[in-house]
Amino acid sequence: MIGLEAIEQMALADDDPDVIIACAGGGSNFAGLAMPYLGRKIKGQSKARVVAVEPAACPSMTKGRFVYDFGDTGHLTPLVKMHTLGSSFVPPGIHAGGLRYHGMAPLVSHVLDLGLAEATTVQQLDAFAAGIQFARAEGIMPAPEANHAVAAAIGEALQAKQEGKQKTILFNLSGHGHFDMQSYIAYQAGKLENYEYPAEEIAMALAGLPSVG
């Protein structure tokens, strides 16, 4: 629905995005904004780049595999084909709880596999720095999850500035951070750190994928 609303709002502004960005943990924020635009892209009505942003500490799209897996650690759900780090993957305690999931929604995984969208990662400290920059500029404190999209949008804007290009960047500010102030306090106190999930631990989790004929 938010994507359909965004299309109407962009039409009122007589503009169309060159880049569409949303954070992605399980995929709902990203899909809500991006899917209507992806429909337009398939029909040749949009040339926008579509970018899903995930934490470097939980990189299901950028370091996972597109295979059949369980959607839960208890293995009670049906097997679905998705980008996954393995259902035994235990993410670190980063301060973006909504993005700490081992897999990506099957439909989001499918459009990534088709090349209709791309995925990138943001480190925790970069996400919070972007959130504070956004709050100072706009007076809105984003949720830690949304900070990942903010960081990617700022990166796109800076790249466009460096290249001397004009870009219309649409991103999803998916939630406020009013209930996440302790995370911001921890960041300001220097208590948070970046975390790159070790390749060997990802390999161990992927080794436990179910066997599908």
Image (tube, rainbow, N blue to C red):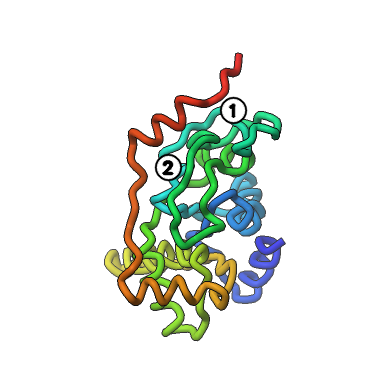
> Residue 45: in sight, yes or no?
no
Marks 1/2: CA distance? 17 Å
Name the amino acid type tagged 1: Tyr
Badge 1 is on which residue? 68
For the point 40% across and 69% down, which residue is it? 128
Q: Position of residue 88 (x, y in %)?
A: 51, 35
Query: Is 22 located above or below residue 91 in the figure?
Result: below
Badge 2 is on which residue? 62
**Callout 1: SS:** strand
Q: Crowdedness of circle 1 by 10 Å Cα count: few (<14), some, many (20+)?
A: some
Residue 121 falls left or right of residue 8 = left
Query: Is 154 located above or below residue 100 in the figure?
Result: below
In the foreground, 83 or 15: 83
Residue 126 falls left or right of residue 99 = left
> Residue 212: in sight, yes or no?
yes
Residue 35 falls left or right of residue 102 = right
Q: Position of residue 182 (x, y in %)?
A: 47, 74
Query: Is 53 located above or below residue 201 in the figure?
Result: below
For the point 39% across and 57% down, which residue is it? 122
Residue 54 falls left or right of residue 67 = left
Task: List the single residue furthest toward the top.
Answer: 213
Name the amino acid type tagged 2: Thr
What mark, if any, has residue 182 been given in the picture? Answer: none
